[in-house]
Image (cartoon, rainbow, N blue to C red):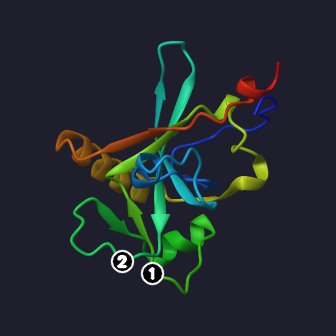
């Protein structure tokens, strides 16, 4: 996204081709479908670029996963998610992407945003997963500069 005319923010929910760690291990290089993801952390890489840590939203029950947070109805509404579905945010894995160089961060991809309080809850769960060494990471490589010569 080279012409970014808006700012990405913590708690934003985006449509994104999330690549699960199990899919990456199987040799996939891009998620099989667009799904909602939440921007939980922003970090600066060694090149001074802003990178987004994205965690997935799923309708698959997360029984027994201590690093999954159920999404309350009010948060589903704020984020533009389906109120009829039970949804969880999975914080024990994430994708990392560089928004200003990514194909995936376009204004039409932003669905909504979670409240600051719910975003803090997700961040706390993500940090707990990292501290417990239960956090899997997948780096997204579909960058504009990989294709434009």
Q: Which mark is residue 57?
A: none
* Quadrant of the drawing holding the C terminus: top right
Query: In the rendering, at what x and y percent does residue 5 appear?
Result: 79, 35
Q: Is residue 46 left or right of residue 7?
A: left
Q: Secondary structure at mark 2?
A: loop
Residue furthest top as drawn? 47
Residue furthest left as drawn? 132
Q: Is residue 142 left or right of residue 3?
A: left
Residue furthest bottom as drawn? 84
- Do labels 2 and 1 touch, CB within 8 Å? yes
Note whether 66 is above or below 55 in the view shown. below
Q: Residues within 10 Å of mark 2 (few under 14, many from 20)?
A: few
Q: Is residue 28 left or right of residue 5?
A: left
Q: Which mark is residue 86?
A: 1
Q: Which mark is residue 61?
A: 2
Note whether 46 is above or below 67 in the view shown. above
Query: In the rendering, at what x and y percent does residue 8 appear?
Result: 63, 40
| Residue at figure coordinates x 62%, y 53% from the top left | 16
Q: Residues within 10 Å of mark 1 (few under 14, many from 20)?
A: some
Residue in the foreground of this view, choosing between 79 and 29: 29
Report how far apart the C-alphas of labels 2 and 1 lie in the structure. 8 Å
Query: In the rendering, at what x and y percent does residue 80 appear?
Result: 63, 69
């Amino acid at each position: 996204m080279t012409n970014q005319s808006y700012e990405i923010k913590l708690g934003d929910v985006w449509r994104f081709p999330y690549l699960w760690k199990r899919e990456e291990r199987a040799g996939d290089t891009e998620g099989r479908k667009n799904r909602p993801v939440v921007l939980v952390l922003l970090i600066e890489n060694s090149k001074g670029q802003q990178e987004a840590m994205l965690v997935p939203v799923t309708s698959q029950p997360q029984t027994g996963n201590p690093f999954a947070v159920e999404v309350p109805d009010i948060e589903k509404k704020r984020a533009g998610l389906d109120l009829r579905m039970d949804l969880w945010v999975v914080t024990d894995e994430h994708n990392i992407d560089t928004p200003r160089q990514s194909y995936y961060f376009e204004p039409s991809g932003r669905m909504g945003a979670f409240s600051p309080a719910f975003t803090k809850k997700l961040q706390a769960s993500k940090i707990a997963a990292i501290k417990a060494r239960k956090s899997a990471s997948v780096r997204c490589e579909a960058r504009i500069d990989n294709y434009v010569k």
